[in-house]
Image: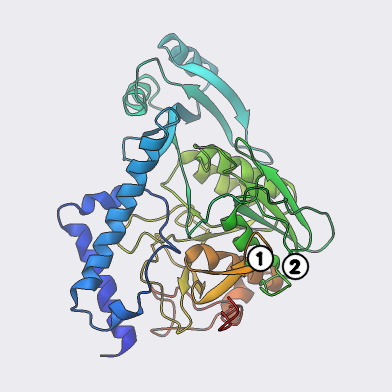
Amino acid sequence: MMMFEKVQLVRKSAFLLALVPGAALAQLALPPVGGLLPPVGSTLQRVTDLPVLSDARGLLRARTDRLRGLVERFPRELELDPEGNPAVRAELLLIGADAATMARLQSAGFRVIETDTIDDTDVRFSRVRVPDSRSVRQALKQLRKLAPGVEASANTLHFESGGSGGLLKGAALAQGGGGGAVIGMIDGGIAAVPGLGAVQQRGFASGAPIASAHGTSVASLIVGSGRVKGSAPGARLLAADVYGRDPSGGNALAVARALGWLAGQGARVVTVSLVGPPNPIMAATVAAVQRKGVAVVAAVGNDGPAAPPAYPASYPGVLAVTGVDARGRTLFEAGRALHLDFAAPGADMLAARGDGGVRPVRGTSFAAPLVAGRLLQLGSIAALERDARDMGPRGPDKHYGRGLVCGDCRTPPAPGRD
């Protein structure tokens, strides 16, 4: 059996796990596993080996454990929404609520925190505090009865779709102006390391912007010009930190606001290496910036093929990106979207470290920025599709989308140096 056929069979086996008891856990949205998995090459040697299935089950278990652990660590800030996703405690987001509706909700005990419009869009929303002692689950049920025409949701969280490495304590923030084509990223903050060029940062969470390992690595894969070569060196990078030091960082409202800011600042391409559940305010904001000509690129995540579709990668028109290793195999842990557009290197590669060095990275987080940078350089999605190298079955397929982009962008580890 050829290796490509083995990978296909492994993925089919993993998908079948979603049909057995306990696989309902796949409906939970959790932080990523990219960068934390053991090498998977050995697990692909024989598709009938138990380690293959055990790794797939392990993805679901790890995903569930991370969700529970996060909410348990921050019970004052977080709770679960009706679908089991982590969300900001006691908050709901509303779209389409008029003044009469808001008055009715206030009479029922809901308290208005703010009513505003996402920057550079027509997306108007209200954020409300749920009545005392009510859970988000209970409050949503009540609100939907009181205001059936309103789009209401919890303020759900998004997580990095690659090993994060955490905050970089004491690291200076990258900064600077400059010309060049403008590209945006939504992630953690970026440390000042050699070769990043012009970076402008803004925070959308408590304590942001603050340098993070994940954000710094992603940035280097876009505009790096030192040891790590990005796919768009010389571009001007706008970075929105949606995490900071905030336990509820990465929430849907923060990501939507970041996207509006980037569009207003002139970014024509925005890359998002984050995954979460669908959310009305995110969907509306993505559609609004797309109407203004902004291309949104997003990672499919690393929770495995049995996980539910990742967002924002699954929103219509968003370019969904998976990762491949140095042998051109899609990553075992790669998640899925409702559609798949492209693949790019996501393993057996280096990215910038916060102290100016480099580190090995793995995950779809690190594939998406390569696609975004190449799109910026080529100028259109049509040109990007022509540039992509067809992989697997002829034409678009569910493993590589429309082909491999930026296959020459990987910075390989050097023996004895890293």
Going by the numbered disc 1, the residue's amino acid type is: Ser
Instruction: Identify the residue at the far bottom of this view.
Output: 1
Structural crowding at the residue carrying mark 2, measured as other residues with C-alpha within 10 Å and reported as few (<14), some (14–19) or many (≥20): some
Above or below: residue 412 compared with residue 103: below
Q: Residue 220 carries which label?
A: 1
Q: Position of residue 384 (x, y in %)?
A: 61, 74
Question: At which x and y percent is residue 389?
Answer: 53, 83
Q: Residue furthest right?
A: 178
Distance between the alpha carbons at the discs numbered 2 and 1: 8 Å
Q: Which element type, helix, strand or loop, lies under badge 1?
A: helix
Q: Nearer the viewer, residue 106 or 53?
A: 53
Q: Are marks 2 and 1 in contact (CB under 8 Å)?
A: yes
**Label 2 sits on residue:** 195
Image quarter for residue 205? top right
Asked if residue 320 shows in the view, the reply is: no
Q: Which residue lies furthest to the front in this view?
A: 416
- Judged from the image, the secondary structure of the residue bearing numbered disc 2 is loop
Query: Which residue is found at the position 58% from the left and 82% from the top?
Result: 414
For the image shown, how many numbered marks are present on the structure? 2
Q: Where is residue 349 in the image (x, y as percent from the top left)?
A: 54, 75
Residue 328 visible in the snapshot: yes
Q: In this view, does 303 lie to the left or right of 232?
A: left
